[in-house]
Image (cartoon, coloured by chain):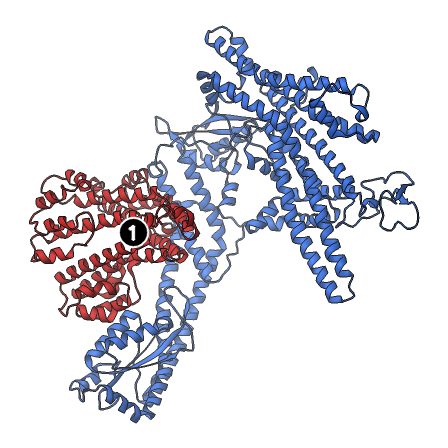
Chain colours: A red, B blue
Amino acid sequence: MYGFEAMTFNIHGGYLEAIVRGHRSGLLTAADYNNLCQCETLDDIKMHLTATEYGPYLQNEPSPLHTTTIVEKCTLKLVDEYKHMLCQATEPLSTFLEYITYGHMIDNVVLIVTGTLHERDVQELLEKCHPLGMFDSIATLAVAQNMRELYRLVLVDTPLAPYFSECITSEDLDDMNIEIMRNTLYKAYLEDFYQFCQKLGGATAEIMSDLLAFEADRRAVNITINSIGTELTRDDRRKLYSSFGLLYPYGHEELAICEDIDQVRAVMEKYPPYQPIFSKLSYGESQMLDKAFYEEEVKRLCLSFEQQFHYAVFFAYMRLKEQEIRNLMWISECVAQNQKSRVHDSVVFIF
Amino acid sequence: MELLKNLPEMDLMRSEKMTFVQLIIPVESAHRAVSYLGELGLLQFRDLNDDKSPFQRTFVNQVKRCAEMSRKLRFFKDQIHKAGLSSSALPTLQPDVDLEALETQLAEHEHELIEMNANSEKLQQTYNELLEFKIVLQKAGVFLVSGKSYEAEEGRELEDNVYPSDYPESTSLLEQATQSVPSNPSGLRFISGIIPKSKVLLFERMLFRATRGNLLFNQAPADDLIMDPVSSEMVEKTVFVVFFSGEQARTKILKICEAFGANCYPVPEDLTKQTQITQEVLSRLSELETTLDVGIRQRNAALHSIGFHLTIWMNMVKREKAVFDTLNMLNFDVTKKCLVGEGWCPVFAKPQIQEALQRATFDSNSQVGIIFHVMDAVESPPTYFRTNAFTNAYQEIVDAYGVARYQEANPAVYTVITFPFLFAVMFGDWGHGICLLLGALVLIAREGKLSSQKLGSFMEMLFGGRYVLLLMSLFSIYCGLIYNEFFSVPYHIFGNSAYKCRDDECSDAYTVGLIKYRDAYPFGVDPSWRGSRSELPFLNSLKMKMSILFGVAQMNLGIMLSYFNSIYFNNSLDIRYQFVPQMIFLNSLFGYLSLLIIIKWCTGSQADLYHVMIYMFLSPFDDLGENELFWGQRPLQILLLLAALVAVPWMLFPKPFILRKLHTERFQGRAYGLLRSSEIDTDSEPGSARHHVEEFNFSEVFVHQMIHSIEFVLGSVSNTASYLRLWALSLAHSELSTVFYEKVLLLAWGYENILIRLVGLAVFAFATAFILLMMETLSAFLHALRLHWVEFQNKFYGGDGYKFKPFSFAAIADDED
């Protein structure tokens, strides 16, 4: 019942919405980033971060710090917050929260499978996995030899199982079809998430469909750009685009036949919301595209906090926090490698 | 007027005089000077580097080092806690270690500890492995043995399912593989191992899927808990034995085992070999156990020696960190040889500070002394009241509303008595009072012990307010004696009742049926009123009138304090156009009511005071008739009414107009002399005052004054009414206790049954403790709080100051625990 969320939303969602808004106010601000960018060593970063919400997570770290420790601890905080919210959540919010992690699950599956393919140590791979995308039998992924086994052995127990229907083949795994698998899974996941949000209705559906459409479009553009010059056929490429979003369906037809970045740009500039993103880039450039997309995404995510009584704030918060962790990682890498001139290249200010 | 001006200074009521001081400290003595000041705890530093981020400041490295050290200390504390030792510190033993020495010492200790931990972890792991092996041997051995006895059956079953009849490489594997041993010629192998109990189900399912059901899974719970090396928690584990066949299945199963964190151990099938290995494992286990024990003892000894100093070290590091944080607030001067600091200190502390600074110069052998001088300040000084254990809680009560403006009259002085007294008026029962008194006395008697230990938030609150509780209980005993209430049982403490029955059959004791036969009951309410029909009307009238008297008295006190504030700040405008009309207004209406009440009590007149007050407004010129209490009441009433009517515009109009006049005069550059009288608070609050003058907005000032006047006029009515809560709460309290006494205790006592009596007693005790002693105390406390914050303090209290927070080691030690 759109417009009447205010009547009943707080019965189940009020507490958690308050929690998530409180968490949001703990996000680092532009002033924090400015301070962080001026840091000389990782210890400076740690010192600054201990004065923020990250304090309890970092203060007990012994001094020669590594970037990975910082990122790990910041992620740990995100995971703790997520778990707390998930524990408190009731249906359908708990399902919604679980949906948020499926993306990480897909990434983790792909990471492990690729890793085993290149004969890396499973334990080492597990450490690299995003903790939000962990599931019980994830380590068993290493056993599987092909997609069918992958599905039958492991993934059938996970929430990803339904997304697999399109990519069960008996082919042996290789880099290419793992990448295709990732995108097929992601497509199925986004579509499912989109359906779920539509089912929830109300402000959640409205805001989430906007956010997910943006996500789908961004993926479509990325798939197109990454597949330029590979042996992926146009039809296969077309199949990887999610069947919703601003670009669906006509934009997808046009993207499917793009052969270089400028063609992609021509397609995208037909869509007013994406014009500013591409107008910032010079012709033929795709390096800064990621940052431009991230900036646009952060803007949209922040806007979702302007409205009350909907679930998109949870999605937005998780995404913003991930962006924040990416920022921190970039800053600490720049500081650690003495590349301070590049520090602003990839940092996306949230506020 | 002369008399009032020559009053003593009323030091108690004013916060300490503060001055703004500047310190110029040579670099070499800076650290020592600041730490001496920290010990003294009487100087509040101002942050002069507000614009710099923490790591751009001068002493950032030292701060970082301190943070690192405190991290190590936390690590030690954690380790000590984990080891189950208690860190017993002897604060008297304070060796004067300097920071560098401490740093190296800590690093050494940490290194040592980490090494020990690593060693013991390794040992622990080996121990765990052996233990697991032992358990697997015991449990899996059982399966294998039982398996053998059922060999025929099992074999058939398995053969039905799968079995590629022969494996060419199985014989060669016999030598290589330790884990898997072909059990019989048909190529049945097994893997045995151990896995955390929580994962068993999933593990089994995964194995089943991976081998497409071609396996036999046996499991048995392990008897002992095994320590998880990561979290050092005890985990329940389950032993499993998987029977399967085929090489591919084996690799798969091993991979799955690895993925699930299951540890596999080879179990020989041969019984003699099994017992042999078991023996071996057992002997190695006991060996390891002794090694582990020695390691743990050594580690505990190390931890113990650390724990001995831990508290001292922690304090030291905390202090050092505070010193460097403070040093970071200071500025370097141009030559980079001195640090410049600014801050507030109370005037009385100047010699002490100077002495500390001299000591610092002397102790650090500095050539140049520390310059300490007074400066002019732009902002208003902080408020600092010196309190002791007794007055602190009352000051807290006032500060909770708002910290007093600098040198403003401090209501806490009066609150010490009025607060517990007003509480007691609502909580008058000497039985309950004694209970509270006992509680308060327990808290005070154990003061020394309780103040050193950490209490829960609720106990902390009780303990902090122990002196409030003490006075509250004393006053409620006093008020209880006046009300003659003891758990609502009347007592004849002060002699016999003044009344007696008119005849013999007045068992239900109506007051009308009683005659007064002797002098009035000497103290408090006559016990004969209790239970009589006119008890309520009598007590209500008494308490209501009493509440109004207290209220009017307290509000007058508040207005009087505003007079002293104006005198203190030399603000004659406020006296003439605020204090005087306020006094007239309040007293011509409610002061007069109080007068009537007293006259009525003294003369015993039957006049209806409601009627008098109401008709004083409605028809002031009418004859009072039987309600006349004294001669000349009517003209007096007319006079008072007129005075009250005049007081309202008096309050409202003159002040803003005069302010405007002063303002224009000032800007025409004429009347500097006049200005001083009204703008004298420029001294105390120059920043805001200047701002105020420059943007003099008449309409704003006027609206402000209007709001104040209206608030006062309406407030004097509503505040007086608000004091009736004294009566209401006291009524509620006595009625509640009557209900519990009569309807629970007496009712239960009416039965002969001991059980009912006991239950009645229990319910009565419970209700008394929780409802009367806790809830009622809380509600009376809150109402007393409100009467002070709103009705009393809004007459004079600004409450927009800020607290003096000196840099002090004592405070640091307190708040970070």
Q: Residue, x 58% and y 24% (percent of image)?
A: B710
For residue B324, side relative to residue B710 (left or right): left
Badge 1 element: helix
Residue B682 seen from this side: no
Compared with B760, B369 (above or below) is above
Q: Nearer the viewer, residue A88 or B134?
A: A88
Q: Nearer the viewer, residue B3 or B515?
A: B515
Counting from the top left corner in percent of width and height, residue B776 is at 65, 47
Residue A181 seen from this side: yes
Compared with B706, B82 (above or below) is below
Q: Which residue is mark 1?
A: A71
Residue A292 position by quadrant: top left
Circle 1 chain: A
Counting from the top left corner in percent of width and height, residue A253 is at 11, 51
Residue B715 position by quadrant: top right
Q: Residue, x 35% and y 32% (percent of image)?
A: B51
Disc 1 packing (10 Å; few <14; some 14–19; many ≥20):
some
Q: Residue, x 36% and y 65% (percent of image)?
A: B119
Residue A240 position by quadrant: bottom left
What amino acid is labelled 1 in the image? Val
Compared with B93, B265 (above or below) is below
Q: Nearer the viewer, residue B88 or A125?
A: A125
Counting from the top left corner in percent of width and height, residue A76 is at 34, 54
Counting from the top left corner in percent of width and height, residue B608 is at 77, 30
Q: Nearer the viewer, residue B816 or B723?
A: B723
For residue B413, side relative to residue B75 (left or right): right
